[in-house]
Image: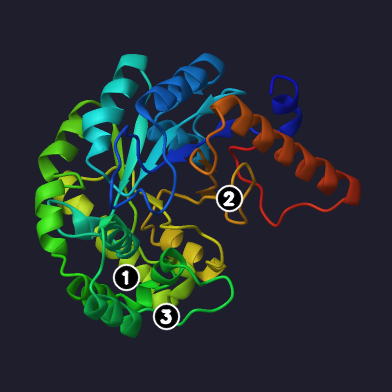
Amino acid sequence: MRWVRPLSGVSLVVPYYHMVSDNHLPHVSNLYGFRTIAGFTSDVEFFARHFEPLTLNDIVDALNGTRTLPPACFHMTFDDGFREMHDIVAPILQRAGVPATFFLNTAFLDGGGLAHYNALSVLLDRVQSRDSRSSAASARLESILPARKKGCATLRERMLSIKYAQKSLVQSLAEAVDFDLDQYVCEAKPHLTSEQIAALLKKGFSIGAHSHDHPLYADLALSEQLAQTRMSLELLKTRFDLSPKAFAFPHNDIGVQDEFFTEVFSEPLLDVSFGTSGLVAHFHPRNIERVSMEKTAAPASQILARQFTRATYLRLRFATSRRRPTATNKIFS
């Protein structure tokens, strides 16, 4: 990483996480891997050792042209607003003196429910953990689940293939396996409360919007994209006096067209937005791509080395072909 980072031309690294825990969590464990407490602590130590930590305000100031970023810097981000952000993540960051932004789905604050795929994960956990299922329950499941096909044959694949647009099926699945999702939320308390968010803000952390109920934006019409974004931002602004106005795309920003960015930044509804495509410059200068720290169990040093290598390759390819990206983010040199 030491030699490839300068070649990449990248100044700012924005890692993102969803969860940090040593426990099995039904609403998350069937969707993706996540860092243990020891693994996350090691990541924080790595970033603090090799990069200068920045606040969200520092990033917005750089985009506004009122400050220059150091050659190697980072800002930690966390999506979905799970309770562990207050209980586990914030204390680790505070001890290390590392600022961060927590992106929240406003529909699920204060026990408001579960995002579509989190609910499916809970139900999948329920089905897999049962010693046996009655033939009647199995028949009910089969009547609801998508048909088996190539690449979608296992129970997990079939359940997780149910899209956000089909979210009405979630309650039918819950009834088929005799499971009360509302009771699960009440007992597990998966998301942050308003009091916990206020405590994070008091400690100097930032919050941002992550849509209202976590749809994939590429599947939505522009009007729905804007409605989801406005609703989440306005609720956070009203409840927590949100500033600066930051947004992270749920799932990813792939397929979101220029019209969306033109609209939200010309109002201006947003000061900055964040995607998930790694160390690349997005076509809109105020949309910053982030690095996932959960797609592999590899240490942060290896993840960043690969990301910087990819960024270097892309930079050299553009230079060789004399082509440039459609836009260059100010935070990338």
Real-space CA distance between mark 1 and mark 3, rounded to the nearest whole angstrom: 29 Å
Residues under labels 3 and 2: Cα distance? 30 Å
Q: Which sits in the foreground, 328 or 282?
A: 282
Which numbered disc, 3 or 2, marks the residue closer to the eye?
3
- Helix, strand or loop under label 1: helix
Q: Local crowd at mark 2 within 10 Å, few (<14), some, or many (≥20)?
A: some
- Find residue 295 and name its label: none
User: Which mark lies nearer to you, 1 or 2?
Assistant: 2
Contact check, label 3 and label 2, Cβ < 8 Å: no
State the residue position of label 1: 227
What's the residue type where badge 2 is placed? Ser
User: Mark 3 belongs to which amino acid?
Assistant: Pro
The kind of secondary structure element at disc 3 is loop
Q: Earlier in the sequence, mark 1 or mark 3?
A: 3
Tell whether label 2 touches label 1 (CB within 8 Å): no
Camera sees residue 55: yes
Number of numbered discs visible in the structure rendering: 3
The quarter of the rendered structure image containing the C terminus is: top right
- Mark 1 is surrounded, within 10 Å at the Cα level, by few (under 14), some (14 to 19) or many (20 or more) other residues, namely some
Q: Which comes before the other along the chain, label 3 or label 2? A: 3
Give the image quarter of residue 269.
bottom left
| Circle 2: element type | loop
- Residue count near mark 3 (Cα–Cα under 10 Å), binned few <14, some 14–19, many ≥20: some
Say what amino acid the circle numbered 1 marks: Ala
Q: Which residue is identified by label 2?
A: 277
Question: How far from the left and from the top, in percent, is residue 6?
Answer: 72, 25
46 vs 99, nearest the viewer: 46
Q: How far from the left and from the top, in percent, is residue 281?
A: 63, 47
- Which residue in the structure is indicated by mark 3? 146
Q: Position of residue 104 (x, y in %)?
A: 28, 50
Residue under the point 49% across and 62% down: 261
To which quarter of the image does residue 38 belong?
top left
